[in-house]
Amino acid sequence: MVTDACIELDLRLSSGAMNSRASRSGPALPSFDDLPISPALRALAERAEPRRYRKGVLLIQEGDQGDTLYIVLSGKVRAFSQGDNDREITYGVYGAGEYLGEISLDGGPRSASVITLEPTVCVVIPRQTLLLHIAQYPEFAFELLSKVIRRARSATLSAKQLALNDVYGRLRALLDSLAETRLAEDRIAETRQTDSRQVETSVDGVLRRLAGAKAGAATTEAPDGRPVGEAPPRDFPRRVSRLTHQDMASRLGCSREMVSRLLKDLENGGYITVEGADLILHRALPTRW
């Protein structure tokens, strides 16, 4: 059995940073080397100690003053705002390798709240540490600026959809976006699985390679018969990691009842079905409903 002490020791060896005061419960501390981040962001993450958070912890409160940046090492967080009537709108869900809180680094109040959706590990970077890092890695300033621009562009698109699209149009765009995200995640998982299959550590495997036996050759096909490296088909059916109706409503800026009705109509029309934790898109959704 792997103990928390072993996990923390492994983190110290792999990244040179360890949270000695972290709780011994919660998610395992990940290695920085496993994160899909740039070298400059990895170097920034190594300047601070990872912190564990349970599900449902409010990391950032909208309106508060703050000057810290959160880098997500594992888990997922949600950025959102809540109105006086307790209705929420979700700006985005972020996972490992993402960072949040950059908007308030100008000294202004937090523009959104951030809450953990599952046990999460983050690195918390104070503004002064970030300034020192940018002085050492000037290229990170452009990376940070690019992140701000992408999120501003995303906010512009969301405002456009809210103003010009009806609820169904926003739902259609959301499902298409989730399908693209799932496709990308599946490709990454497939690549990692293929890489692990190609690593032979057994004595028999080494001997087979030396002998040139075909039995020791690496797998050249994906599970569905496609050559390794070839993009998965974009045809239907397509899978979407299913969200709750309330989560969809928060992203779309509408009521849960409206989402439930639209999804039921699409299911009755043969466009979608529910399969376990996934939503299956059987064909392209109509432009209007």
Image: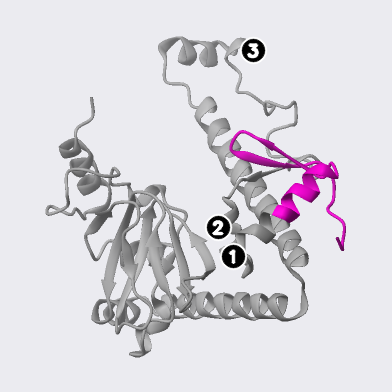
Above or below 96: residue 41: below
Is 269 within the magenta?
Answer: yes
Q: How many other residues sit within 10 Å of disc 1, few (<14), some (14-19) or many (≥20)?
A: many
Residue of label 1: 251
Q: Counting residues from the N terminus, which is met first, the one under dot 3 or under dot 2?
A: 3
Residues rendered magenta in the picture: 261-289
Identify the amino acid type marked 3.
Lys
Which residue sits at x=75%, y=59%?
Answer: 172
Q: Which image quarter holds the C terminus? A: bottom right
Identify the amino acid type marked 1.
Arg
From mark 1 to mark 2, how far is it between C-alphas?
A: 6 Å
Above or below 286: residue 225: above
In this view of the protein, which residue sits in the foreground, 262 or 240? 262
Q: How many other residues sit within 10 Å of disc 2, few (<14), some (14-19) or many (≥20)?
A: some
Element at label 3: helix
Residue of label 2: 247
On screen, residue 136 versus residue 166, left or right, reads: left
On screen, residue 142 versus residue 159, left or right, reads: left
From mark 3 to mark 2, how far is it between C-alphas?
A: 50 Å
From mark 1 to mark 3, how far is it between C-alphas?
A: 52 Å
Residue of label 3: 214
Q: Are marks 1 and 2 in contact (CB under 8 Å)?
A: yes
Above or below 155: residue 55: above
